Image (cartoon, helix red, strand yellow):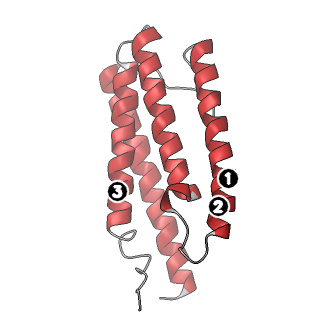
């Protein structure tokens, strides 16, 4: 596969992913009667949610830095999966969205907001699982292990 072909396929895949996410969000928001959140904002429910959210983010930043140092020094055994930055980012997104759903359920006026957040998180997990299980639909060739 040529480099140009790879980038075109990857661009198409990313475009399809974002279109699917946008359609899912529009349809689910209309069905549940949830307002569209402001673009590029954290949309904290209250001050308690803001403090918890930032505490979790700072914790994950520290874990990423420490994990980076540990993974660099552990070359013979290979890097630890649980300390890989991509894995920590997935966990961070999952944890912050679960916290958001809990705070929305307990403190927000619209009772369907937390349902929207959980359904959005589930849809993202399904899409990402599908992408990784299919090696990004054949775009990324699997590594061949040789012993």
Label 2 with label 1: CB-CB less than 8 Å:
yes
Q: Are marks 3 and 2 in contact (CB under 8 Å)?
A: no
* Callout 2: SS: helix
Using the rendered image of the protein, determine whether residue 21 is visible from the camera's viewpoint. Answer: yes
Return the x and y of residue 124 as percentages of the image width and height: 39, 46
Write down the quadrant of residue 84 in the picture.
bottom right
List x then y, in percent, for residue 104: 44, 17
Front position in the image: 118 or 6: 118
How many marks overall?
3
Q: Is residue 18 above or below residue 14?
A: above
Q: Residues within 10 Å of mark 3 (few under 14, many from 20)?
A: few
Where is 90 relative to 40, above or below?
A: below
From mark 1 to mark 3, how far is it between C-alphas?
27 Å
Question: What element does badge 1 sit on?
Answer: helix
Q: Residue at x 64, y 51 (%)?
A: 64
Q: Which of the 4 image quarters holds residue 57?
A: top right
Q: Is residue 20 above or below residue 134?
A: above
Q: Residue at x 58, y 78 (%)?
A: 76
Counting residues from the N terminus, which is met first, the one under dot 3 or under dot 2? 2
Mark carried by residue 70: 2
Quarter of the image for residue 141 reads bottom left
Residue shown at the point (63%, 38%) measured from the top left: 59
Residue occupied by mark 3: 129
Name the residue beneath numbered marker 1: 66
Marks 1 and 3: which is nearer the front? 1
Q: Is residue 108 visible?
A: no
Q: Is residue 127 left or right of residue 96?
A: left
């Amino acid at each position: 596969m040529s480099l140009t072909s790879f980038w075109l396929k990857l661009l198409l895949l990313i475009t399809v992913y974002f279109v699917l996410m946008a359609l899912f969000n529009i349809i689910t928001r209309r069905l549940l009667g949830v307002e569209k959140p402001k673009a590029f904002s954290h949309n904290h429910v209250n001050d308690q949610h803001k403090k918890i959210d930032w505490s979790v983010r700072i914790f994950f930043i520290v874990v990423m830095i420490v994990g980076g140092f540990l993974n660099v020094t552990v070359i013979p055994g290979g890097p630890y999966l649980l300390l890989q930055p991509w894995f920590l980012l997935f966990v961070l997104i999952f944890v912050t969205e679960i916290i958001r759903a809990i705070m929305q359920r307990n403190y927000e006026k619209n009772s369907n907001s937390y349902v929207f957040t959980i359904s959005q998180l589930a849809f993202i997990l399904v899409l990402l699982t599908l992408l990784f299980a299919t090696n990004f639909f054949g775009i990324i060739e699997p590594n061949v292990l040789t012993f």
